[in-house]
Image (tube, helix red, strand yellow):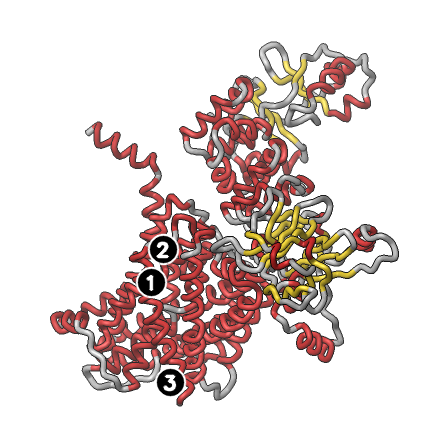
Amino acid sequence: MDKIKQLWKKLLQTGLWKLGLFFALIGPGVITSNVDNDAGGITTYSLAGAHYGFSLIWILIPVTVALIVIQEMCARMGVVSGKGLSDLIRERFGAKITFYLMIILLLANLGNTLCEFAGVAASMEIFGVSKYVSVPFGAFFVWWLVVKGNYKSVEKAFLLACVFYLSYIVSGFLVQPNWSEIRAASITPTMNFDSGMLTMAIGIIGTTIAPWMQFYLQSSIVDKGLKAESYKYARMDVIFGSITVNVVAFFIIMLCAVTLFHNGLKIETAKDAALALAPLAGSYASLLFAFGLLNASLFAASILPLSTAYTICEAFGWESSLNTKFVEAPQFYGLYSLMIFLGAGIILLPNVPLIAIMYYSQVINGLLLPFVLIFMLLLINDKRIMGKYVNGVLMNIISWATVVILNGLSAAMVISAFMN
Amino acid sequence: MNNDIGPNDEEEAGNMAISGEPQVFLFLSELLGKKIIEQTGKELGRVFDITAEFLEPYPLATGLTLGSAQKEKPLFLSWENVVEVEENIIVAPGSADKLIELNLGANELLLRDDLLDKQIVDTDGAKIRRVNDLQFLEIMTGLHLVHVDVGFRGLIRRIGITKAMDFIFQGLFDYQLPDQFISWKLVQPLLSPDRLQLSITQNRLSQIHPADLADILEDLDIKQRKAVFQSLDVETAAETLEETDPKIQVSLINDLDSEEASDIIEEMSLSEAADLLGDLPKAKAEGILNEMEQDIAEDVKELLAHPEREAGGMMTTSYVSFRPQMTVGEVMEILRTEAADVDIVYYVYITDEQEHLLGVVTLRDLILADSGTTLEEIMDERIISLKLDDKDDTIADHFAKYGLPAIPVVDDDDKMQGTVMFRNLLDVVAPHLGK
């Protein structure tokens, strides 16, 4: 008994378990992943399940691998260099490239923010609240909590609310799907080369691996101030997070496949999905779905503008801190407020072509992703930045392969967008 | 903001020129990429980077490289061969034979690789800025680096859209984007950690107030933070450390060996030192305590025994006390020699042989009193004191109610143990105040 006590005491003293546990629970990787399950993500997953049943579910496995590969590199760069991604890009590739990259990032993230507010509007409409009430209120809430509130504790509250994603998993079991069919679908890649299915596949990849994530994840890792030796915790965190996001995605696709696809219901938006769920899976499932969408939208809407403002200010050397006054960091607060103002404002315009905007924001993301990934690979193989932590041969093969495939898909999407 | 060149500064840079000689300002971004052509018309290549030697007050360009130094050693041409800088860089005939492999001197650096797009510390504004461009003054003696461009105009010059932006701003707002230059003399470059030592040989960081320096440290990445901190002299390091966030304090001290750490911690005020040691891993703290001077180490250990948020943990034991029979003259004499090393001089405490607190005298009382007066006659016996285990809110109440700069702490027998300064309370309470 004494021995166990001693061992326990020793374990406590090392403090390592705390770090490990902490990272597994609320590390930057997990937070990034949960923001990744945003309005756009939930919409895409629901549509994939509703339109194509189980047939696209296999794609989540390669996506998980790709996500881990990419985020692991970000985490490693953050820990080793102690610098954010935009910082590294500026120092390595100069002002010109950085400037244009940041403009595209601003546009892409503005599009994403817009989607988040669209998500707020859609989810609140399920509860019977007009978008003219919910969107301004949501925008003010997001602005207020970051500028006036204590951002860190709010982040934890959102994260806690993500526990509601478990409801997707519970609902997934409740609808009693045919597990053997799912198992078969998960491991047999099926792909029809009809343009709709291809677009949907690219959509799933695009919403899961978005450019802003790499910037956000790396900055959060830097903020934690980890030393290169404790890097393994960051890696655990990233792997755990990447798996989480895809498990949730899996259950959303499955839920919609079992209920909507098998009953032949066609839907256009996440709101349709939530409403259609009510008669099939019970009104609780519908409400939980709506609440999940609201939480995801608000969480992402509060992080995206902030992350964008940080990233851009970091690249150009502008003051960027929530602890400064407006006059001391005008670019930071300006960018932040502009993102929220435009993101929420455009949703409120009458007759705004929402579907088209969402589609083009995906296209801009697709345009940006190849550049970001290639810069990342060049940076992570730069000995002057990474020292002995550069990619190994195997890691380089895996990561280049991942990047080439992702870039090919992005290119396909962008080209098809211009062809239409 | 101190972004424009002060008139004095410009004048001084100008004075480097012999009067009457034409002086030209050039930007690094304009020089990079220029063709290098011999007077005979033979083209050698294009400028990739410019090397400069760290001289006071302004670095001097020593040569140019024809390729990137990132992979292999590029070709290098000494600046002596440069005849004229115009549309192209004109070099003397026969320069092609003088091209050698780049070999940087101990005091030399590559301006593009080491400075452009990197971070520097503006020592006047106490801020970290990013270098958008560098400005040279071309005079007879050569090309001197005089200004660092940190402004938006420098950024758009780099992007190559100055004309378009000028047109837009002029047309729409009737506004010309101003230049934002910082004189080289007010700049501390932050080179990559392996080269940082070079730039810090002339350390300008000590011109910054420790509180501002602490903010700068917090903004730097871990490697730079460590390098900058370790470049500071012991006294500045201690003052800066006192102002730094506890988490960062711990990581900075963890990077030092016990001996270096103890030198710095000895210079800190006792209560700050105790707080810091309390935050460190036990083994590390003990190692440092062993290296510290005996008496300081013992005082710190005493403070460490109390929780941080109680009077016992907040107080400092570095104060002066005297017996009631001492005269003001004697006390002043002693104070003059002791004042440099004690945390608090504003109060002098009067105690008996058993260290029972009898009264207090302020420095003001001492200055106003005749030197023959005894402390007994002028001391204030209405003592406001705290108990060792008083919590922070009780302490805050006391400070708020009595408006004192410091309050003595006594144990259950009324024996003096230490004194809590208002500043110590603030350090503990301020982080919890929120925004």
Quarter occupied by residue A320: bottom right
Say whether residue B61 is left or right of residue A285: right
SS of the residue under disc 2 = loop
Q: Nearer the viewer, residue A81 or A255?
A: A81
Which residue is labeled 2 in the image?
Answer: A391
Q: Do tag 1 and tag 2 residues touch (Cβ < 8 Å)?
A: yes
The picture quadrant where one finds residue A353 is bottom left
Gap between marks 3 and 2, in whole Å?
A: 34 Å
Q: Nearer the viewer, residue B274 or A68?
A: A68
Task: Tell us which disc is closer to us: 3 or 2.
Answer: 2
Give A347 or A386, whichever is nearer the viewer.
A386
> What numbered label is drawn on residue A416?
3
Q: Counting residues from the N terminus, which is met first, the one under dot 1 or under dot 3? A: 1
Q: Chain of mark 3?
A: A
User: Label 2: few (<14), some or many (≥20) within 10 Å?
Assistant: some
Instruction: Please say whether residue A278 is visible from this viewpoint.
Output: no
Image location of residue B332, percent across then percent down: 76, 18
Where does the C terminus of chain A fall, quadrant-wise? bottom left
Identify whether B395 is placed above or below B369: below
Q: Note whether B385 is above or below B110 in the view shown.
A: above
Chain identifier of the residue bearing label 1 in the image:
A
Give the residue at mark 1: A399
Residue A119 spot, x, y in % from top left: 41, 75
Residue placed farthest to the left in the image? A180
**Residue type marked 3:** Ser
Q: Secondary structure at mark 3?
A: helix
In the image, taking residue A166 as reference, residue B205 lies left or right, namely right
Query: How far apart, in angstroms, are the residues tagged by discs 1 and 2?
Result: 9 Å
In the structure shown, which secondary structural element does the residue marked by tag 1 occupy? helix
